Image (cartoon, coloured by chain):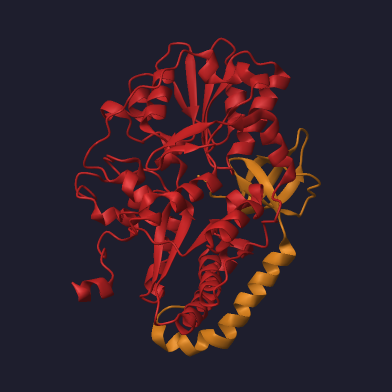
């Protein structure tokens, strides 16, 4: 626990916040986007927004794989689970996410469909081995952190020559999402969202390294600090970003030296490249169609591709009109700007995916901020 | 989803498997995504797989830096936060 608790020391946190308060300039604002939903929750869980000066604003990014998965893809997974011969293996996060017609994987399971929660894709391979007369489909979602285990499972299935294992691949890429945010009309033209710099996700970066972000520093002049997930990591990274902005620098800095290298994990990247390839286009909830932002299974491994094996059709979906999830994912709205937040839409009865996931911004606000939704400064201005 | 925890490697098994420990809880994880792990190393674990080795020297460096900050600056703010240890 030394390497968890050690990074939560209250005194060091106070020292860091005192330094941040000293170092911020009074004549400007700082809008920092924490890309990853894990960061959003860490930030609220440890009360970090309350420790920051008023002119430092954290903008919540789209780094929540459950939230950005389009409802149409979830509907397809539920269709798969509905087949008599299929066992659908899913990470637990997906089960309560609302699909079309108020359906969900949890409801499908309650109706007798065979949906199993797995901790890893390797467990799904085991399921396939244990159930030779059933088709086991791994519902694979997630960013680069979760992708290598999926690739590994497909290779393992190939080695075992499993005829009853396949993957419904929905993996997405972090750099494409950051670029989509920076290119969005809200940031470029309308000025609804200001992002001065990014707190980069450290666990994704253990795999991809810090190199992919260099483009954002050069091309978009936005600094990126790759930040750990413990409160001291986050505070130290915010301080590094503020220093860069004060000095007019836009560089890639790595606060998570203990786990991230510039080139990432070569073995894992090699494995992913062997099994998966870029999709020309993937539709994100909130961001829409983003070119080359998702992964699919390569032709050599096509027999393990659930989209090949089963007759899956993507159907048009009507989203709940009141739900502001897409705008929340883009950072345009705060969860509390949504009319149904905390009333109609709660973690127990979620209308949108952002309220379900342990990384969704709405879930974070509901859990930690329900009773203190306005910052004192905003209240005073109003 | 992308959350991961640092864990200490307790024992190595066949087929790239290992037993790791976090806060007194042991579990089995796969080491297939990294090379050359030994007992006593720290790895960062996500969905049952070690995704990278944790550099203990770097972690200790960060901790030392935070400790130093706490000792030099932490006290001056203690008065503001009575009842918080």
Chain A is shown in which shade?
red
Q: Nearer the viewer, residue A104 or A144?
A: A144
Q: Quadrant of residue A315?
A: top left
Q: Is residue A322 left or right of A335 when viewed as pictured?
A: left
Q: Residue at x 57, y 40 (%)?
A: A146
The residue positioned 64% from the left and 48% from the top of the image is: A208
Query: Which part of the image, by quadrant, shows the C terminus of chain A?
Result: bottom left
Q: Is residue A142 above or below residue A133?
A: below
Q: Is residue B21 above or below residue A71?
A: below
Q: How many numbered discs?
A: 0
Asked whether the viewer can see residue B22, the reply is: no
Point out residue B14 in the picture as x, y percentages from the top left corner.
78, 34
The answer to whether any part of residue A27 appears in the image is yes
Q: Is residue A370 left or right of residue A50?
A: left
Answer with left or right where residue A235 lies relative to residue B16: left
Pick the residue in front: A147 or B13: A147
Give the chain letter for orange. B
Q: Say if A134 sits above or below A30 in the image.
A: above
Residues A192 and A104: in front is: A192
Q: Is residue A9 left or right of residue A125?
A: left
x%, y% of residue A66?
Answer: 43, 40
Residue A8 spot, x, y in % from top left: 53, 68
- The location of residue A347, given as percent across then percent down, is 30, 45
Q: Quadrant of residue A149?
A: top right
- Residue drawn at 66 percent across, 46 percent down: B51
């Amino acid at each position: 626990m030394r390497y968890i608790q050690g990074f939560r020391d209250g005194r060091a946190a106070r020292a860091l916040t005192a330094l941040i308060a000293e170092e911020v300039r009074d004549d400007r604002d700082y809008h920092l986007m924490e890309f990853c939903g894990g960061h959003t929750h860490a930030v609220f869980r440890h009360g970090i927004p309350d420790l920051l000066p008023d002119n430092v604003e954290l903008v919540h990014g789209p780094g929540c794989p459950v939230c950005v998965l389009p409802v149409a893809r979830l509907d397809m997974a539920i269709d798969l689970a509905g087949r008599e011969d299929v066992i659908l293996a899913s990470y637990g996060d997906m089960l309560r996410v609302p699909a079309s017609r108020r359906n969900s994987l949890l409801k499908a399971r309650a109706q007798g469909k065979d949906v199993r929660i797995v901790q890893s894709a390797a467990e799904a391979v085991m399921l396939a081995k244990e159930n030779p007369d059933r088709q086991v489909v791994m519902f694979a979602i997630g960013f680069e952190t979760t992708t290598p285990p999926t690739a590994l499972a497909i290779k393992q299935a190939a080695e075992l020559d499993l005829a009853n294992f396949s993957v419904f691949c929905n993996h997405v890429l972090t750099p494409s999402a950051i670029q989509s945010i920076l290119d969005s009309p809200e940031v470029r033209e309308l000025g609804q969202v200001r992002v001065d710099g990014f707190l980069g996700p450290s666990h994704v970066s253990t795999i991809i390294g810090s190199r992919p972000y260099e483009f954002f520093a050069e091309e978009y002049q936005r600094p990126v600090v790759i930040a750990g997930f413990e409160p001291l990591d986050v505070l130290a990274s915010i301080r590094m970003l503020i220093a860069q902005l004060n000095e007019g620098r836009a560089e890639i800095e790595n606060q998570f030296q203990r786990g991230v290298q510039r080139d990432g994990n070569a073995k894992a990247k090699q494995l992913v490249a062997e099994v998966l390839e870029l999709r020309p286009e993937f539709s994100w909830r909130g961001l829409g169609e983003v070119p080359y932002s998702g992964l699919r299974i390569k032709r050599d491994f096509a027999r393990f591709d659930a989209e090949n094996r089963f007759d899956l059709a993507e159907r048009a979906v009507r989203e709940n009109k009141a739900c502001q999830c897409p705008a929340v994912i883009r950072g345009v709205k705060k969860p509390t700007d949504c009319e149904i937040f905390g009333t109609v839409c709660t973690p127990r009865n979620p209308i949108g995916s952002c309220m379900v996931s342990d990384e969704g911004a709405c879930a974070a606000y509901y859990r930690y901020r329900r009773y203190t939704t306005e910052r004192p400064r905003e209240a005073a201005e109003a | 989803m992308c959350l991961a925890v640092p864990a200490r490697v307790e024992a190595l098994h066949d087929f790239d498997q290992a037993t790791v420990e976090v806060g007194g809880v042991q579990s089995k994880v796969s080491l297939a995504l990294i090379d050359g792990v030994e007992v006593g190393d720290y790895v960062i674990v996500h969905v049952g797989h070690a995704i990278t080795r944790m550099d203990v020297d770097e972690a200790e460096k960060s901790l030392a830096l935070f400790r130093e900050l706490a000792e030099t600056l932490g006290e001056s703010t203690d008065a503001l936060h009575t009842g918080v240890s």
